[in-house]
Each structure stands twice: as structure tokens, then as C-alpha cells.
Image (cartoon, rainbow, N blue to C red):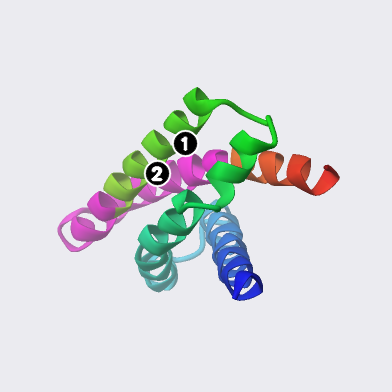
Amino acid sequence: MVEERFTAVLKVHVRVREFRDRVAREEPLDELYPLLLEVHAAMPAHFAEEDRPGGFFEAIVELGIVGAFSVKHLRRDHAELLAEAADVVTGWKRRSDTENRRRLNHFARELGNHEAVESHYADVIEAE
């Protein structure tokens, strides 16, 4: 069961990296939109898995990697990323391609920054 949960979390991280890379390559918006929808749909369960008892957040606090303040910051990031993803998705059809590209780039950058922080913490856990 634990292995399945970590496999699911890892799959989301792989898709997020693919999403960021494809946005950075400025692939056509009509090709990025389905991946955006997939990432957006996976985010709530993914974030809940990280925040569950015994999950990633608890592990990084218990191992002394970060304190409660940092976890509070990660939770705030989650809420902001969920809101931004929802905004990008819900306004997609009514915005210009230029505006969609701008918002998509911003969202991908913010998501990438968040994932980089979590990846750093995961690397520290692995080194323990």
C-alpha cells in the first residue's frame, strides 16, 4: 500500500516535469491544454497525499528537515497553486492565446519552483 502511494506521487511529479518542460519549449497551446487538465485534475489528491498523517509533510518535520513554519508555507503554496490552476483552466476558452500562454508560463514556473523545494526535501530524506 505504501509503495502504491509513493508510486502515484512519483507519477504526478513525472507528469509535472513533463508539463513544465513542454510549456518551456512553447509547444502549441492545443497540445498543452490536455496536459494542463491532467495536471490540474491530479493536484488535489497529490497535495492531500503529501499532507496526510504519515505523509511527506510529517516526514520532513519528524526528520528535522524543516519546521512547522515551512510546512505551513508549503500548504499555502498548495492552496495558491490549486487556485492558479483553476483560474488558468476555467478562463482558457475566453482568453486570447497570448494571455493563455502568459498565464500558463507563470503557472508552470510557480509549480516548478514548488516542486523543486519538495524535491530538495525528498533528496534530504533519501540521504538520511
- Magenta segment, prevailing SS (helix, strand or loop): helix
Q: Which secondary structure, mark 2?
A: helix
Secondary structure, mark 1, is: helix
Q: In this rendering, does residue 115 appear at all?
A: no
Relative image position of residue 15 (x, y in whole percent): 56, 66
Q: Which residues are magenta?
A: 86-115
- Which mark is on residue 74? 1
Residue at x-position 55% and y-position 54%: 20
What type is the residue that disc 1 sits on? Leu
Q: Which residue is mark 2?
A: 78
**Compared with residue 110, is residue 68 higher up or lower down, i.e. above or below?**
above
Position of residue 126 in the picture relative to residue 50 (left or right)? right
Badge 2: residue crowd in 10 Å (few <14, some 14–19, many ≥20): some
Given residues 66 and 18, the one toward you in this image is: 66
**Mark 2–mark 1 CB contact (< 8 Å):** yes
In this orientation, which residue lies closer to the viewer: 64 or 124?
Answer: 64
